[in-house]
Amino acid sequence: MSILSSTQGTPERVWSLVSLVAANDGRMDRAEAANWLNPTFLENGKLFDDKESFAQVQGAATALGALTLDNKSLELNQACDTADYRSFADWTHQHLRSLGSDQKDAVILEAYAWVLARCRQEGDSAWFRAMPASEQADAINEALPDGSDDDGDRRMNTSKLASWRRWLIFMGLMEELPMTGTSRFHLSATKRLHKEIERSDLPRNVEVSAEDFLFRVRSEAPYLDGGKMFLASARNNSIASDERRLSPVLSSALRDLHDAGVLELKILGDRPGYHGLTGDIAHKVGAFHAVSIRGDVNI
C-alpha cells in the first residue's frame, strides 16, 4: 500500500497512530492500537467496527516507514522523530526527499517538482489553479514517469490528488485558503523553505552568494528550481531550463521570507550573477545576487 493509495491515512491520523505507538515504548499490539484509534460503537442497536479506516492509516504509516508490522505488533522506526507534530512533518519531508524515482512514494515530491517546473515555463501558477481536480490529476499522471501504483491504478487520480494535497500542506508546500474549488489550494513553499533555512548551518548575518545559497536549497529541497527532481521532471517533459530565472513558487517564497525579515535578498547595481524572480512584478525585489540570513524569526 502506498501513501497516496491509503486515502483515509491522512497526515493527522498517521501522526495519531505513530505518536500512540511511540508513547507505548515504541511497540504496540495492532488490535489495541486499532481500538484506540477506531473504537467500536453502537448505532441503532448494531455494533460497528471501522477496520478499513484503520488499515489505511496503518498502510500509510508503514509505507512512510514510520512503523513496521512485526507479527501482530506495530513497531516504531527509531529514526522517526516523534517529538511533536511539526517534528514528524520534518521527518516525513526528509524521508520523502530521499526516495529514488523507482520507489512508489517518490511520486509525492516528483509531482510537485513537475508543477513547479511547469509554473516556471508558464511564468505563474494560474494555469494549475484554474484546472478542475480531474484535469489536475490527468496532467500530473501524464507528466510522471511510466508506471502504476501498488493498487494497480494510475499513479495519480482524483482521490490520490486529495491525499497529495493533504501531505503537501502537512509538509509546508501548499496552503488551503478559505475559498471554494481547486483555486483554494495555493502552491507555496514559504513554510518549508523557512524551516530548512532554520535547520541549516548557513552562516547568519553574513552575505552568501546566490549560487551558494541556492545550492543549499536544492540539496534540502530537490523538487525546487535546479534540484535533481526538478531537473529530471523538466527534462522528461521537454521543459527548457533557465538557471537564472526562478519559478514563481520559489520566487514567492524568497520574497515572503525577505519581507518577514528571515533573510535579505541583496541587490547591488547592474552586475553579473543575478538570479531573476518571477511572479509579483510590483514587489521591490526582482532579482538578487546574494543572500544574508537573519537570526531566528517566526512567521
Image (cartoon, grey):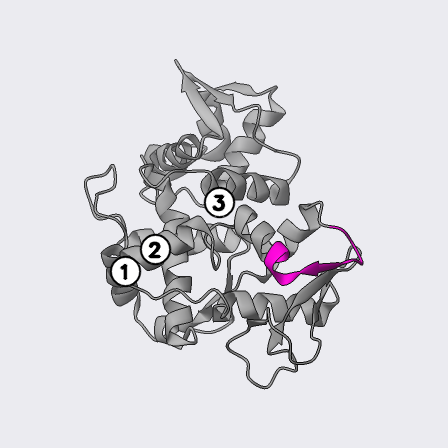
Among the 4 quarters of the image, the one containing residue 255:
bottom right
Q: Nearer the viewer, residue 228 or 100?
A: 228
The mark closer to the camera, 1 or 3, is 1
Q: From where the camera sits, is residue 163 visible? A: no
Q: Position of residue 9 (x, y in %)?
A: 41, 42
For the C terminus, the image quarter is bottom right
Tag 1 secondary structure: loop
Residue on which disc 3 sits: 11
What is the C-alpha distance between the residues marked 2 and 1? 6 Å
Q: From where the camera sits, is residue 224 visible? A: yes
Which span is picked out in magenta?
203-213
Q: Amino acid at mark 2?
A: Ser
Q: Earlier in the sequence, mark 1 or mark 3?
A: 3
Find out whether the residues at labels 3 and 2 contact each other: C-beta distance under 8 Å.
Answer: no
Residue 59 is left or right of residue 273, and the answer is: left
Numbered circle sitting on residue 237: 1
Q: Position of residue 142 (x, y in %)?
A: 23, 58
Q: Measuring 32% from the left and 51% from the top, which residue is drawn there? A: 160
Q: Measuring 46% from the left and 41% from the top, which residue is drawn there? A: 96
Residue 24 is left or right of residue 238, and the answer is: right
The image shows residue 101, relative to residue 206, as above or below, that is above
For the N terminus, the image quarter is top left
What is the C-alpha distance between the residues marked 1 and 3? 30 Å
Find out whether the residues at labels 1 and 3 contact each other: C-beta distance under 8 Å.
Answer: no
Residue on which disc 2 sits: 233
The image shows residue 165, relative to residue 148, as above or below, that is below
Q: Nearer the viewer, residue 5 or 34?
A: 5
The image shows residue 56, relative to residue 157, as above or below, that is above
Q: Is residue 206 magenta?
A: yes
Q: Earlier in the sequence, mark 3 or mark 2?
A: 3
